[in-house]
Image (cartoon, rainbow, N blue to C red):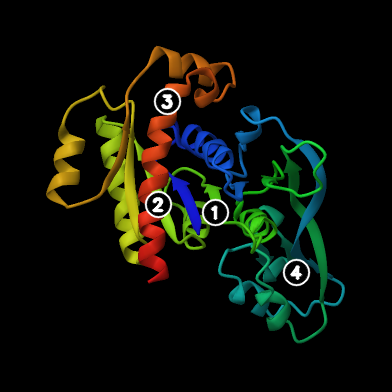
């Protein structure tokens, strides 16, 4: 079962849930994979000690425009939906704006004069890790996009591709925050989405945006409230009114905040907190049975 752990905004505790749930499932003897898909700032490995096993470059298409051959017809610029081609016909100027290119190859298809040559550029890397001693099997995957890139989508796709191991019982995808393309590319590859939020006005607003997006994608979801005893009751009222599953409420705790700030897993620092991840696991098992039926 593929689970995306997502949030409408950063800082709600998404990685906190993903890393502790991953470790909790492991200790139950469950074959589980963790994929850090937050390719701008992947940080799951701050909390889990693991040894790197492999690294795979993520390559993407980039056209090379030869202005000596170009007839300046403008078709390549017309075909480009991302305005990635700088084209001034009166000055006979044409060039690629690499930062805007999405590698769709539309310009190459449009060109009838052979003025565009295909090439590839390294845009990210997917690293594979194992937190098991003396094991060659990788169970943690981290995608990291190059700083110059404007989108992490291709790296997210590659991360999930490498992390999708058929033998695993659970795949946990630590999703990028927000509701833009990186979020969508992650959740569309999941069977179920855990939405982590907080009981604040911003938390509620961003949760609503996430839920509206998931409804359009026809993806099942449930909500985890982190720092549940802060804020007000508007979040709970919204969940109740809209009949949205509340999976688990994790209270605000100085202990949890301290563990997280030190890069420690909460279930290691405070074993009693395992009860929250037990609730999440039991809920997911029920969802898994529904999917299999």
N-term-proximal mark, 1 vs 4:
4
* Residue at mark 4 to residue at mark 2: CA–CA distance: 60 Å
Q: Is residue 99 visible?
A: yes
Comparing 80 with 186, the one in front is 186
The span from disc 2 to disc 1 (Cα, nearest Å) is 10 Å
Farthest residue to the bottom: give it: 112
Look at the numbered discs 1 and 4 and tell me whether their residues touch, using CB distance below 8 Å: no
* Relative to 167, residue 141 above or below: above
Q: From the viewer's side, name the closer residue of 46 and 109.
A: 46
Q: Is residue 10 left or right of residue 44?
A: left
Residue 253, image quadrant: top left
Of circles 1 and 4, the one toward us is 1
Q: Quadrant of residue 68?
A: bottom right
Instruction: Determine the CA span between mark 1 and mark 4.
Output: 55 Å
Residue of label 4: 92
Q: In the figure, 234 relative to 8: above or below?
A: above
- For residue 170, the mark is 1
Read off the residue under disc 2: 284
Question: What is the secondary structure assignment of the residue under circle 1?
Answer: strand
Q: Earlier in the sequence, mark 2 or mark 1?
A: 1
Q: Dot 3, how many residues are within 10 Å of its Cα: few (below 14), some (14-19), or many (20+)?
A: some
Residue 165, given in percent of the width and then of the height, sits at: 66, 60
Discs 2, 1 touching: Cβ within 8 Å: yes
- The residue singled out by tag 3 in the image is 273
């Amino acid at each position: 079962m593929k689970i995306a752990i997502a949030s409408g905004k950063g800082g709600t505790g998404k990685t906190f849930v993903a890393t502790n749930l991953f470790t909790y499932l492991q200790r139950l003897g469950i074959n589980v994979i963790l994929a850090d898909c937050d390719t701008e700032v992947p940080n799951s490995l701050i909390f889990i000690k693991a040894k790197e096993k492999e690294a795979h470059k993520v390559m993407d298409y980039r056209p090379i425009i030869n202005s000596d051959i170009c007839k300046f017809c403008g078709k390549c610029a017309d075909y480009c939906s991302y305005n990635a081609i700088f084209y001034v016909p009166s000055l006979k100027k044409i060039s690629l704006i690499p930062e805007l290119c999405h590698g769709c190859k539309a310009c190459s298809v449009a060109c009838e004069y052979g003025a565009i040559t295909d090439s590839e550029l390294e845009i990210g890397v997917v690293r594979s890790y194992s937190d098991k001693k003396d094991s060659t099997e990788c169970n943690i995957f981290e995608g990291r996009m190059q700083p110059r890139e404007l989108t992490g989508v291709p790296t997210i796709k590659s991360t999930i591709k490498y992390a999708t191991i058929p033998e695993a019982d659970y795949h946990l995808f630590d999703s990028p925050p927000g509701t833009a393309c990186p979020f969508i590319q992650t959740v569309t590859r999941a069977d179920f989405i855990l939405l982590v939020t907080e009981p604040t006005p911003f938390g509620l607003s961003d949760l609503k945006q996430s839920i509206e997006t998931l409804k359009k994608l026809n993806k099942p979801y449930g909500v985890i409230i982190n720092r549940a005893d802060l804020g007000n009751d508007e979040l709970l009222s919204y969940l109740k009114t809209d009949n949205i599953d509340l999976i688990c409420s994790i209270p605000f705790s100085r202990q949890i905040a301290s563990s997280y700030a030190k890069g420690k897993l909460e279930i290691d620092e405070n074993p009693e907190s395992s009860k929250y991840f037990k609730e999440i696991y039991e809920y997911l098992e029920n969802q898994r049975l529904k999917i299999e039926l």
